[in-house]
Image: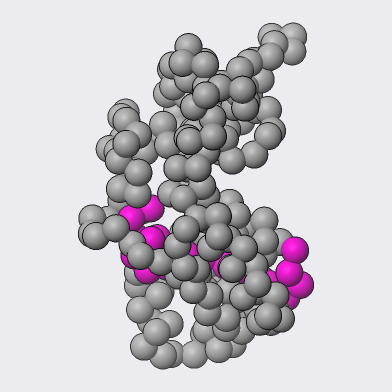
Amino acid sequence: MRTEAPLLAPIFRSDGQARLLSALMLDDEERNLTQLAEQTGLAYPTVHREAARLLQAGILVERQVGRTRLLRADPNSPLFTPLREILLITTGPVVLLKEEFCRIQGVESAFLHGSFAARMRGIDGPAPNDIDVLIIGTPDPDEVYDACGRVEEIVHRPVNPTIATRAEFDRDSGFHTQVRNSSTVPVLGELPWP
């Protein structure tokens, strides 16, 4: 089943193509088709078809290990750098924030909310100006703000963190109710509500 073009980057043929490219271009790991299907949530035949197109275009390279095909982005492709830059700006915030927050003690979970998360979830609206992230836990605020600042430099959008303990988030407030009822994208850990 073909998915619509992603709202954050409608230059890609489909959301599935953008997810597959993100999985392969935002790190250096090799993956087989089954791993890529699991990571991206795409059907195996879709991954197989898209991978064949990307191999033919010279964007990916493959290595055979026994009967397993291992794929990765080809850093020597002239398309590598511009594609990676686009992907960092559109899908990279989740990957980059996860890397940053994994290094900070006290972060129990984190997730995007607001307009950026809504566009990632396919909800129409204007292009987002910033990225809102809610961090649950008791991290050092300076470390969180520094991490978000590093991500801002890469994704060219302000990253606005809000930090709350689980007890604070469980209390009813207008902001917390609004976040619970809006589109979210997990970054790290579990969402603090069902």
In the depicted structure, whether residue 49 falls above or below residue 72:
above
- What count of labels does the image hold? 0
Q: Position of residue 119 (x, y in %)?
A: 33, 55
**Residue shown at the point (66%, 82%) measured from the top left:** 141
Viewer-closest of 22 and 34: 22
Which segment is the magenta one?
103-121
Q: Position of residue 57 (x, y in %)?
A: 46, 16
Is any atom of residue 44 visible in this view?
Answer: no
**Residue shown at the point (47%, 68%) measured from the top left:** 158
Q: Position of residue 49 (x, y in %)?
A: 43, 17
**Residue shown at the point (52%, 16%) measured from the top left:** 58
**Residue shown at the point (58%, 74%) measured from the top left:** 135
Is any atom of residue 113 visible in this view?
Answer: yes
Magenta-drawn stretch contains 118: yes
Q: Quadrant of residue 140?
A: bottom right
Q: Quadrant of residue 62?
A: top right
